[in-house]
């Protein structure tokens, strides 16, 4: 994200774009550093038994990442019984985070298009329901829409979005003649540049280029190289020729990269998908989007249960924030 968010109402309106889906009945914990969003995790508000250990795991991850400041927001959709349930849970989450030296100065509630602060660390937040800003008027949301990022309604939608397929292109890519020669580094970089920085939709890329690239990443050495480009900063495979990297640091929002990777995925038949799914998972996990990382790993392992990089990533996501219920 390049735009600045003005106030916490804008931040709440923006969160679905950061998460990739609209959180419902959720506790969203945002880790902040230097006034910026560092990491976002989500827990199910209705799974009260998991809230305490779940918040503990979040606190652990934040502490490990050096994130000392957080904000908790309860997204309430189904009327809770008793009425004070969300604020009580926010207080509990705040106490758990404090045990990890993470200070949640703001505890917010949002429901029915309104938001208010149960606890406010700045003295400027509404204490009674105030209307959330119209997402169309929030710069960061506008920028996400420009980048082709729209939040999905739920995790099920997130899963379905990865399952989509441009059948005709995918068939052509899968059926492209196999070339014996390995893809040259320069051709690989050029194709990845097109994927990451190209302005044309990926399904309009030449089929032979897409097919060569998609076959090349079946080779673990090539795949690890590309993984290092799309998931910079993540421990694991490191690109051996960073000078050739088509990933220009700071030039692209990680979410814009993911949007392009998802377009690439849609152009592939299922058997070719696990490497790209791990790129999506790595990119998502390295920039704090655990939900998408978990869903992408899950799909890669459904296609190829023995896919090692997906299993490694799955373990990392699970250790950081149990994917089924958290993040
Ligand atoms: Zn405040």
Image (cartoon, rainbow, N blue to C red):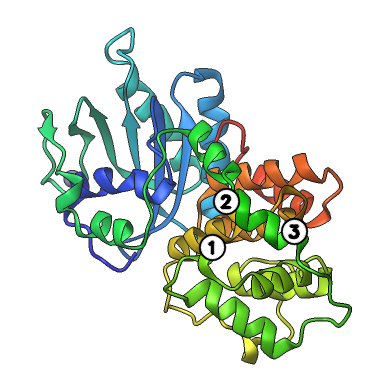
Q: Quadrant of the N terminus?
A: bottom left
Residue 221 left/right relative to 49: right
Q: In the rendering, at what x and y percent does residue 122 appear?
A: 17, 49
Q: Earlier in the sequence, mark 2 or mark 1?
A: 2
Q: Earlier in the sequence, mark 3 or mark 1?
A: 3
SS at mark 1 in the image: helix
User: Marks 3 and 1, Cα distance to the nearest angstrom?
Assistant: 14 Å
Marks 2 and 1: CB-CB under 8 Å?
yes
Q: Earlier in the sequence, mark 2 or mark 3?
A: 2
Q: In the rendering, at what x and y percent does residue 298 appear?
A: 69, 41
Near-viewer residue (7 or 158): 158
Q: In the rendering, at what x and y percent does residue 40 appear?
A: 44, 48
Residue shown at 71% from the left, 80% from the top:
239
The residue that label 1 is drawn on is: 203
**Mark 3 residue crowding within 10 angstroms, few (<14) / some (14–19) / many (20+):** many
SS at mark 3 in the image: helix
**Mark 1 residue crowding within 10 angstroms, few (<14) / some (14–19) / many (20+):** some
Q: Is residue 288 placed above or below 237 in the rendered structure? A: above
Looking at this view, name the residue that lies furthest to the top.
81
Residue 283 left/right relative to 149: right
Q: Which mark is residue 174?
A: 3
Q: Quadrant of residue 305?
A: top right
Q: In the rendering, at what x and y percent does residue 71 appear?
A: 34, 45
Q: Quadrant of ligand 1?
A: top left
Residue 163 left/right relative to 73: right
Q: Which mark is residue 166?
A: 2
Note whether residue 320 is visible.
no
SS at mark 2 in the image: loop
Q: Is residue 121 placed above or below 193 in the rendered structure? A: above
């Amino acid at each position: 994200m390049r735009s600045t968010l003005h106030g916490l109402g804008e931040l709440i309106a923006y969160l679905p774009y950061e998460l990739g889906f609209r959180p419902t009945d959720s506790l969203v914990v945002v880790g902040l550093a230097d006034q910026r969003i560092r990491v976002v995790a989500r827990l199910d508000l209705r799974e009260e038994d998991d809230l305490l250990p779940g918040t503990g795991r979040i606190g652990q991850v934040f502490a490990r990442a050096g994130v000392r400041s957080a904000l908790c927001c309860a997204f309430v959709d189904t009327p809770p019984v008793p009425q004070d349930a969300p604020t009580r849970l926010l207080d509990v989450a705040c106490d758990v985070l404090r045990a990890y030296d993470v200070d949640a100065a703001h505890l917010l509630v949002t429901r029915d298009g309104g938001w208010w602060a149960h606890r406010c660390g700045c003295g400027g937040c509404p204490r009674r329901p105030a209307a959330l800003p119209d997402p169309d008027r929030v710069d960061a949301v506008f920028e996400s829409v420009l980048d082709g990022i729209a939040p999905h309604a739920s995790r099920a939608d997130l899963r379905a979005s990865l399952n989509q397929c441009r059948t005709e292109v995918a068939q052509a890519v899968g059926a492209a003649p196999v070339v014996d020669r390995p893809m040259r580094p320069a051709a690989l970089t050029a194709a990845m540049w097109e994927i990451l920085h190209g302005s044309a939709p990926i399904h309009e890329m030449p089929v032979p280029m897409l097919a060569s690239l998609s076959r090349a990443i079946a080779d673990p050495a090539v795949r690890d190289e590309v993984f290092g480009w799309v998931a910079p900063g993540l421990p694991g495979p490191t690109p051996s020729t960073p000078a050739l990297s088509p990933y220009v640091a700071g030039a692209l929002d990680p979410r814009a990269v993911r949007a392009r990777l998802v377009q690439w995925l849609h152009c592939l038949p299922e058997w070719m998908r696990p490497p790209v799914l791990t790129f999506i998972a790595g990119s998502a996990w390295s920039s704090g989007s655990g939900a998408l990382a978990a869903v992408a790993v899950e799909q890669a392992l459904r296609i190829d249960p023995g896919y090692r990089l997906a299993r490694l990533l799955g373990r990392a996501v699970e250790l950081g924030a149990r994917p089924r219920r958290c993040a």
